[in-house]
Image (spheres, grey):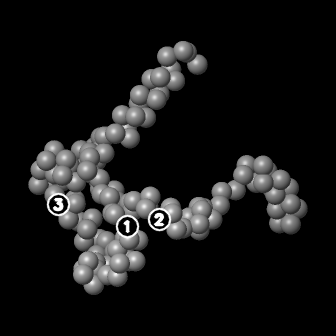
Amino acid sequence: MHNNQPKKLAKTHAHVAMTQLNVKQGIKKFGEKGNEVFIKELNQLHEREALLPLKKEDMSHEQQKRELLYLMFLKGKRDSTIKTRGCTDGRSHREYTAKSDTSSPTVSLQAVMMSLPLMQRETGM
C-alpha cells in the first residue's frame, strides 16, 4: 500500500458518507422528485404500521422522555435515482436500555472455523 492510499480511501469513505442530505436539503436539491420519494417512504412506513403517530398531549411525561426521533435522508444515486433512508435516533435510549438488549450477537470467524469440521462430520459432506 502506498503512503497516500489510506488517506485517499478515507477521503472516499467520507465523501460517500457525507453525500446524504436531510429532507429539507434533499427537497431543495432534487425538487419535486425529492418530495415524491420522501412522501413514498412515509406512505410505506404508514402502510406497514412501522410508526404509529401519537399526539404529544396524549402522552405521559415518561413517554415523552422516552420518545425517539426519526431521521430521514435523501441520496442521489449514480443512475440518477433518488433513494430515501430512515432510521431512529436511539442515542436518548442509552441511559435506560441495557447494552445486551440493543446489540446483535456476531459470530466470530474462529467459532465458524471450529464448527465446520463438526458440521461436515454430522452431515457426511
Mark 3 near mark 2, Cβ–Cβ under 8 Å?
Answer: no
Label 1 secondary element: loop
Type of residue at label 2? His
Q: Earlier in the sequence, mark 2 or mark 1?
A: 1
Q: Quadrant of the N terminus?
A: top right
Q: Residue furthest bottom?
A: 58
How far from the left and from the top, in percent, is residue 113?
79, 50
Q: Which residue is depicted at the point 63% across and 65% down? A: 100
Which residue matches tag 1? 68
Is 1 left or right of 23, judged from the image as shown? Answer: right
Using the image, tell me which numbered label, if any, was put on residue 93. 2
Which SS class for mark 2?
A: helix
Report how far apart the C-alphas of labels 2 and 1 lie in the structure: 8 Å
Closest to the camera, between mark 3 and mark 1, is 1
Image quarter where the C terminus lies is bottom right
Ranked by sequence position, the earlier of labels 3 and 1 is 3
User: Is residue 30 in view?
Assistant: no
Category of crowding for the residue at label 3, using alpha-carbon neighbours closer than 10 angstroms: few (below 14), some (14–19), many (at least 20): some
List the single residue furthest toward the right.
121
106 or 80: which is nearer to us?
106
Residue type highlighted by circle 3: Glu
Q: Position of residue 49 (x, y in %)?
A: 34, 79
